[in-house]
Image: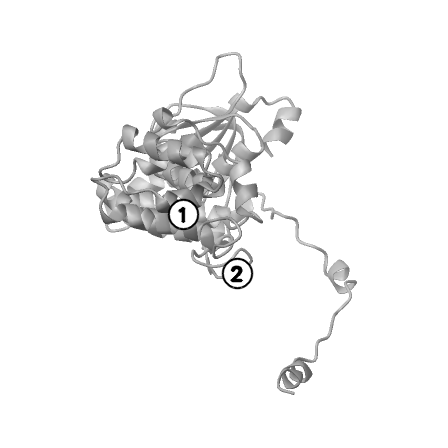
């Protein structure tokens, strides 16, 4: 839609995607990055620029390619007692070996690393290409290894853990770990946790912003994500009448940022975590209580992707399977 508007004469700078919480834009940021569509985010870090997401990607990259010194240098220093010099020594030893991961298992643990080093090596061996639990279970394996370090390093670990679960869900949409990693980028370690900055003035880029950061701004086209109960109003903003009214005011602020076109995105389903790539476990979402059915005639409703006509669905050949016969054949 953004690119269609751009072809129609509306530059990306005149389009904005707004959301109640910074974490709501995670899937969109990954897709924009994959498609090389420039964007700048206001109100929190870019999803892929947050330190904990980079840590997870570094672990996966190092498991995929043990000769990736940038990823290895970053992930080794997550361990307590492992500093730059210790990491460099280990990486040098690995670079000299024909099988870096096998060499890593034979290298003595840094003196101050303790038992964390053993778990690190075991996880890498488990994630070795061709021998692990398979994709996307591998990213869950990496997350379970990383979570204790997340608790140790960050006070807001619960919020960051939600981001990692979101990353895990995004990754399940890719056919393999290699495909997932090649379509995302990992900056050097010294670039972590920088605030998302504005590109050069002569560049065109899409605006992503929390509703709070959008106050006082206006754009020709505005897309508001997750206009459902639980997001707008937030789960944490329904405890009292004043809190609920503040949530209503935020929706009003978001909708009035649009000059010409306003798109309210209402997802029907939210998929749950911890399932395989083709899993269909989900919960249904309901439209925000602030837009009751009486107001719907004032909106133009559409669905995406467009629903197929009933006649077209009936033209599809039906495949009949005798499940009973197949089950009996299994016991012969």
Q: Quadrant of the C terminus?
A: bottom right
Locate the N terminus and report the quarter of the image it occupies. top right
Q: Nearer the viewer, residue 71 or 106?
A: 106
Q: Nearer the viewer, residue 244 or 28?
A: 28
Q: Which residue is mark 2?
A: 280
Q: Which disc is residue 18 wearing?
A: none
The kind of secondary structure element at disc 2 is loop
Q: Residue at x 55, y 43 (%)?
A: 178
As drawn, 37 above or below 141: above
What residue is shown with label 1?
Answer: 124
Q: Quadrant of residue 329?
A: bottom right
Give the class, few, some or many, for how many residues have Cα within 10 Å of label 1's Cα (few <14, many ≥20): many
In the rendered image of this protein, does residue 30 appear above or below residue 266?
A: above
Q: Position of residue 192 (x, y in %)?
A: 35, 28
Q: Residue 206, relative to residue 230: is it above or below?
A: above
Number of marks: 2
Q: Residue at x 63, y 82 (%)?
A: 330
In this rendered view, identify the residue nearer to me: 148 or 314: 148
Residue 181 in view, yes or no: yes
Residue 213 point in image, percent of width and height = 36, 28
Q: Secondary structure at mark 1?
A: helix
Q: CA distance from mark 2 to mark 1?
A: 30 Å
Residue 31 coordinates in the image, percent (x, y): 53, 37
Q: Which residue occupies the extreme top position in the image?
A: 202
Is there CB contact under 8 Å for labels 2 and 1?
no
The image shows residue 77 at horizontal and vertical percentages of 30, 35
Residue 20 in view, yes or no? no
* Residue sitting nearer the eye, 276 or 205: 276
Mark closer to the chain start, 2 or 1: 1
């Amino acid at each position: 839609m953004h690119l269609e508007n751009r072809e129609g004469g509306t530059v990306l700078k005149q389009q904005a995607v707004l959301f109640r919480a910074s974490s709501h834009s995670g899937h969109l940021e990954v897709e924009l990055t994959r498609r090389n569509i420039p964007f700048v985010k206001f109100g929190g870090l870019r999803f892929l620029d947050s330190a904990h997401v980079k840590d997870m990607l570094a672990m996966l990259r190092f498991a995929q390619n043990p000769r990736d010194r940038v990823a290895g240098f970053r992930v080794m220093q997550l361990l307590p007692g492992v500093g730059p010099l210790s990491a460099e020594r280990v990486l040098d030893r690995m670079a000299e070996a024909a099988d870096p991961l096998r060499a890593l298992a034979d290298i003595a643990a840094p003196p101050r690393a303790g038992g964390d080093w053993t778990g690190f090596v075991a996880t890498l061996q488990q994630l070795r290409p061709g021998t692990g639990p398979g994709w996307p279970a591998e990213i869950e394996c990496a997350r379970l290894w990383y979570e204790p370090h997340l608790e140790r390093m960050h006070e807001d670990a619960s919020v960051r853990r939600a981001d990692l679960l979101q990353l895990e869900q995004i990754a399940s949409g890719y056919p393999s770990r290699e495909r997932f990693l090649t379509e995302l980028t990992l900056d050097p370690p010294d670039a972590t946790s920088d605030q998302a900055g504005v590109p050069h003035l002569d560049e065109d880029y899409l605006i992503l912003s929390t509703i709070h950061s959008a106050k006082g701004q206006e754009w020709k086209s505005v897309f508001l994500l997750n206009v459902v109960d639980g997001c707008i109003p937030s789960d944490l903003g329904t405890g009292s009448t004043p809190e609920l009214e503040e949530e209503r005011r935020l929706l009003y602020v978001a909708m009035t940022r649009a000059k010409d076109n306003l798109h309210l995105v209402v997802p029907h389903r939210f998929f749950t975590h911890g399932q395989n790539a083709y899993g269909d476990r989900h919960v249904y979402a309901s439209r925000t209580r602030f837009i009751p059915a009486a107001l719907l005639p004032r909106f133009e409703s559409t669905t995406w992707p467009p629903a197929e006509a009933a006649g077209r669905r009936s033209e599809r050949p039906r495949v009949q399977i005798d499940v009973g016969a197949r089950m009996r054949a299994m016991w012969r």
